Structures are given as C-alpha cells and as structure tokens.
Amino acid sequence: MGDYETVQVDWDGDRGVGTVTLDRPDALNALNDQIRTDVLAAMQELEAHNEDADGVALRVVVIEGAGNRAFSAGADIGGFSDESAGGSSDPGLYQFVREFPAPVVAKIDGYCLGGGFELSLACDFRFASESSRFGLPEVDLGLLPGAGAVQYITKLAGPGLAKEIAMTGEHFPPERMSDAEVIHDVYPDHEFDDAVEEFVTDLAGQAPLSLQALKESAEMATQTGLREGIAHDRTMFETLLSTEDFEEGAAAFNEDREPEFQGK
Ligand code: CO8
C-alpha cells in the first residue's frame, strides 16, 4: 500500500478488508487538509483492488484513529483560516465515504468530536468503546457542524437529541448515542477489538453486490420519496436475480452450507 503522511492503510486480501487509520495522534487525529486528502486517496487505492479481481475484492473498509485517545477531535482548529472551515476538499470526503461502494465501518475509541463525529456519520456503521466520548463543539467556536451532523442525527434520533448535542457542545457517553441509535453498539474496552473484528468478518462474507445495492437503497430512503425508493429496490432485486452470487446463495441454501460470494 502507498505511503501517506497522515494515514496508515492496511489491506487484508483474504477477507477483503481495508483499514484506514487516521494517524495524527499528537493532535488527537484532527482533520486537516492533508489527512482529508490522504483518506480519500487511501480509500481509492483500496478500491483499486477491484480492478484486477474476478468479482469484488474490497468487501469492507474500517476507519479508525491512531493512539488510544481519539477517533478524531474534529477539524483542525489551526486550519480554520482556510476559505471554508476545514478546507476545500472537505465536503468531497464526507460525500465520498457516504457513496463509497463498499460498506464503511467507523471504529471509535476515544474522542469523536465535530468533523470527526461527522466523518463517522458518513460511515455505514459506528461502533464505540465504552471510554469514547461524542460531541459537536462547533457552537463553542461560534460555528455549526458544517458536514450535516444535525441533519443526520435528526434523521437517526430526532431533533431533540440533535439540538442537545449541537447546542450544548458537551461531550456525551457512547451509551447515550447507542440508546438513541446514533451509533450501532458500544462495547467494554477489553472486548472492543474482538467485537468489531467479528462484525467486520461477518459483513465481509456477505454478498458484495447486495451490500452495494443496499447501501444505495438506504441512502435513497433518506433522500427521495417512497415510490422512487421502492422502484429502485425492485430494479436492483431483478438485477441481483441474474448474478452468479444469487446462484451461489441458492445452491448453498439447498446444500446446507455457507455461501462463498464472489461479487459477480
Ligand atoms: N484541532 C487541532 N488540534 C487539536 C484539536 C483540534 N480539533 N483537538 C485537540 N488538538 C490538539 C491540542 O491542541 C493538543 O495539542 P498540543 O499537545 O500540541 O497542545 C493535543 O491535541 C491534545 O489535546 P489537549 O491537550 O487539548 O487534550 P485534552 O485532553 O486536554 O482535551 C479535547 C481533549 C477535549 C478533545 C480538547 O483537545 C478539545 O476540546 N479539542 C477541540 C475539539 C473541537 O473543538 N473540535 C471541533 C472542531 S470544529 C469542527 O470539527 C468543524 C467541522 C466542520 C466540517 C466542515 C465541512 C465543510
């Protein structure tokens, strides 16, 4: 994998799992322009494994933070003199993660604040260790979360919690986030790595073309009307019926064995 200034990238070809580690631990993995550019490039590099594959090679991407203090403490406050808060590539990164063809899992251990929280909200799954803390401190800077956190938290948990987090700027424990379904689950620190690993391994074994279509479908459900969303799902259902993976899934069911999906 390529060398990046501010992220580490790992590729587990057996499971098809790529890991992107935000690697500015001294600044609590705060997001400056360089780290945003590096995350984008690292994910594109992981996606390029599909080009030589017979099917879909990249099944899941995990984003995590280096060190044990933070997933990310948000936009780099030192970079705020840029013309847009957090730099010009910023909306591109959030959108890129949201539309990325493989599922993306945010593995949150420590502070998950501001733009870091928003990055996790762009991911498909959010898991946190019990010592994590969530917050939107932009209000303390005279700003608001610029990458849609209030919109997304409102859709996930309602306006009450979205306003509480964004208007107080306080740090919230992960249990509060999981009770409100803003994150998927919270684990004791000593179980955290294994629990996320198990989830990711299971997800990586699911039919990749189904996962891509499901990701699109869920995104559509937040953006479009019901009729349009159902029409999309119907079309995708018919497309998936003609894949080799459907043949494999049906054969595995009939033979009472685990399917081995290729993504074709
Ligand atoms: N930016 C830059 N550096 C940071 C950041 C940050 N966001 N957060 C922490 N650091 C640095 C500190 O400056 C410190 O560096 P140094 O050791 O060189 O002094 C180091 O990380 C450790 O931090 P602390 O000493 O402060 O550690 P504490 O344990 O005392 O406190 C906190 C930890 C509570 C996380 C504290 O660091 C803090 O409050 N940080 C700022 C959090 C914040 O306000 N984040 C939101 C930024 S705004 C935002 O994210 C907007 C997103 C907009 C997206 C726009 C899309 C278009």
Image (cartoon, grey):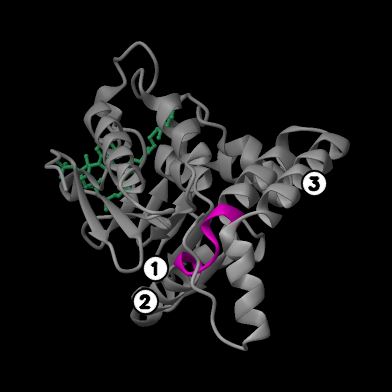
Residues at discs 1 and 2 in contact (Cβ within 8 Å): yes
Q: Which label lies toward us, 2 or 3?
A: 3
Q: Which residue is mark 1?
A: 131
Q: Which residue is mark 2?
A: 189
Is residue 136 among the parts visible in the rendering?
A: no
Mark 2 residue type:
Asp
Q: Which residue occupies the foreground of this view, 52 or 184?
A: 52
Question: Where in the image, quadrant-wise, is ligand 1 located?
Answer: top left
Residue for point 65% across, 41% down: 219
Q: Which label lies toward us, 1 or 3?
A: 3
Q: Does mark 1 have its CB less than 8 Å from ligand 1?
A: no
Is residue 47 among the parts visible in the rendering?
A: yes
Mark 3 residue type:
Arg
Mark 1 residue type:
Ser
Q: Position of residue 173 (x, y in %)?
A: 50, 63
Please determine whether, in this image, residue 206 is positioned above or below residue 119: below
Quarter-of-image position of residue 78? top left
Mark 1 and mark 2: Cα distance apart in space: 7 Å
Mark 2: few, some, or many residues within 10 Å (few <14, many ≥20)?
Answer: few
Q: Earlier in the sequence, mark 1 or mark 2?
A: 1
| Label 3 residue SS | helix
Q: Position of residue 34 (x, y in %)?
A: 22, 30
Specify start and end residues of the magenta stretch as a single range. Answer: 203-210
Q: Position of residue 248 (x, y in %)?
A: 58, 70
Q: Position of residue 221 (x, y in %)?
A: 74, 42
Residue for point 63% across, 77% down: 251
Residue for point 29% across, 15% down: 81
